Amino acid sequence: MGRSATPEQGSAPPARARVAWQRTKHAGVYVRHLKGCPRAAAPESRCRCDPAYRACCRHPVTHKVIWSGSYRDINETIAWLASAGEKAAPALHERAAAGPTFGALADQWWEGVGHGQIGKRRGKHTYAETTLKGYDRSLRNCLLPEFGARPAADVTPREWQFFVDRLAGEGLSRSRIANHLAVVRAIYGWACRPTRRLVDANPTIGVELPPVDEVTRDRAATAEEAEALLEPLAPDDRVPFAIAFYAGLRRSEMDRLEWDDVDLDRLWLVVRKSKSAAGTGRRLPIASPLKPILLSAFELQGRPDRGRVLGRLSVTSGRLVPRVTDAWTEAMAAARGRGEKLVLDPIGLHECRHTYASFLMAAGYTLRELMEYMGHSSLQATERYVKLLPAPAGPDGAADRLNAYLAARKAGL
């Protein structure tokens, strides 16, 4: 029948109640004495009135607090409390016949993922920490409020398609919708396995995502652009963009970056934990323009012995990019007011990471080195940065590095 609740915890007693309801020795049963009765002020006193009794419990399906009527006989109140569960029995049987709710499946799946018993790709790989954080946000903020109480088998493919279409109509990006749907597909895919059969089928198979609406993020700024884009930013906002420009860290990596991980004297930085094993524990070179920016942040934080390089700044809340975009817009407007021409093409943190990769390529680092410093697990992910390099000016000097190598070999160097 569920745990009982006091009137203060659940629904309020009726408006006609003139005296507070008091607990009795029977769980879920409350008594109201008449005004002036000694027991109304002191529970240990003798009752001198004809009290009223009420009972409350939580509905076994909705879990909302429900109250009985007012009774003069406590036995009638206790009988109502006992019958409340009996009246809900048909609903409980109907719910049981419908199978587990989507929320129950999600809880069971999430517990298995948390203990490493459930992974992606038929259990071959565990989920990355950043992926799980995104799944957690999708479940808490979007999926469970809408589908958590529904029997999982009752949500039809058509409903899931309408859900996707509605999110697209509300202006949600395709990538965000795809992230929500990925969680649903993972839960149903796990639940409908022939060895489990918690549901008969995966209703999200065939659900269509909206057309691609995202702008490609394969942009890389030049060194001059990077410097100009950092200039108008507030000191706190400048730090994460400088780290992405000159060290190539992902959002999650810079979010966890500690002062102990940075060696400004030797211009090295250590990534203690990344989204993959390939990126965890890597040491990478940082560009010299990052040093004064980090030194300034270090001074502003009071020269701490340890702690986050970003201080209290969050790069995962979604507020950073709109804030710096406004700063760039205001800087261009101010330049126009002075009769100057200033063009600042807004850039995202991930594109700043592209910029760092293009700097490494232009400086002559090998693909293998680039793969290591970017934290990639394969060269295929690294080769995409080759096309971000500026086109060569012409054939003149193209053979210089090759001939310099052959000359050095001939000289025995």
Image (cartoon, grey):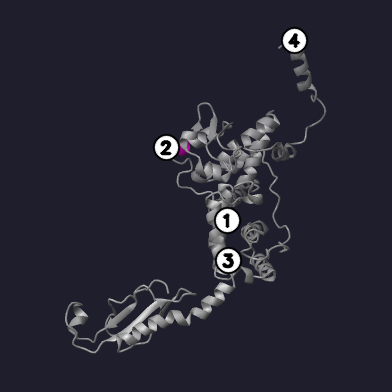
Query: Is residue 210 among what the camera can see?
Result: yes
Q: Are marks 3 and 1 in contact (CB under 8 Å)?
A: no
Q: Mark 2 or 3 closer to N-term?
A: 3
Q: CA distance from mark 4 to mark 3?
A: 72 Å
Please name the residue that numbered disc 3 is placed on. 102
Which residue lies under the disc numbered 1? 135
Residues 173 and 107: in front is 107
| Cα distance between the residues tagged 2 and 3 | 43 Å
Q: Relative to residue 80, is residue 167 drawn left or right?
A: right
Mark 3: which amino acid?
Phe
For the C terminus, the image quarter is: top right
Residue under numbered circle 4: 411
Q: Nearer the viewer, mark 4 or mark 1?
A: 1
Mark sitting on residue 306:
2
Decide: is 293 above or below 6. Answer: above
Between marks 3 and 1, how big is the CA–CA gap? 15 Å
User: Of discs 3 and 1, which sits in the foreground?
Assistant: 3
Per the image, label 4 sits on a secondary structure element best described as loop
Does the magenta-highlighted stretch encompass residue 132? no
| Residue 318 visible in the picture | no
Q: Quadrant of the N terminus?
A: bottom left
Q: State which mark lies toward you, 2 or 1.
A: 1
Q: Nearer the viewer, mark 2 or mark 3?
A: 3
Which range of residues does the magenta coloring cover? Answer: 295-299
Amino acid type, mark 1: Tyr
Distance CA(mark 2)–CA(mark 1)? 31 Å
Residue 113 drawn above or below residue 265: below
Q: Is residue 63 left or right of residue 246?
A: left
Between discs 4 and 2, the one toward the N terminus: 2
Three-letter amino acid code at the position of disc 2: Arg
